Amino acid sequence: MAPANHDGIATKDPIAEAIEAQAQAEEMLHASALRYGEEQPGTDVDAIEVVLAMLRAVRVHRTAIGRQIEALGLGVNMSGAR
């Protein structure tokens, strides 16, 4: 049963939403790797999937770090290179 807010309206569990989003992201990575393997015969699909997952992890990390720096209010403009 979904938790309810103070008005009694059902809300989604943030943990369940995060797990669902992660599962969808993994499915998309897998599908992309399979598609690449079909287009490039002889490709190690598992290796492609790992590389795609690592690239996604880098994007998520950069976003999280950027938000953390912004939350500190330091007025620092960090580019990807920095």
Image (cartoon, grey):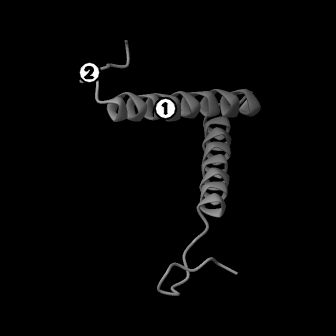
In this rendering, the answer to whether 80 lies above or below 5 is above
For residue 3, what is the image quadrant?
bottom right
Instruction: Count residues near mark 1 (Cα–Cα under 10 Å), then give few for <14, some for 14-19, many for 20+.
Output: few
Residue type, label 2: Asn
For residue 20, what is the image quadrant?
bottom right
Task: Locate the C terminus and report the quarter of the image it occupies.
Answer: top left
Q: Nearer the viewer, residue 79 or 2?
A: 2
Q: Earlier in the sequence, mark 2 or mark 1?
A: 1
Which residue is outermost to the top?
82
Left or right position of 12 against 79:
right
Q: Position of residue 14 (x, y in %)?
A: 58, 61
Task: Locate the N terminus and report the quarter of the image it occupies.
Answer: bottom right
Is disc 2 placed on a helix, strand or loop?
A: loop
* Residue drawn at the location 61% of the way across and 37% of the way down: 36
Is there a contact, CB below 8 Å, between mark 2 and mark 1? no
Q: Nearer the viewer, residue 22 or 1?
A: 1
Q: Which residue is mark 2?
A: 77
Q: Nearer the viewer, residue 82 or 70?
A: 70
Which of label 2 and label 1 is nearer to you? 2
Which residue is outermost to the bottom?
8
Q: Position of residue 71 (x, y in %)?
A: 35, 35
Q: Position of residue 16 (x, y in %)?
A: 66, 63
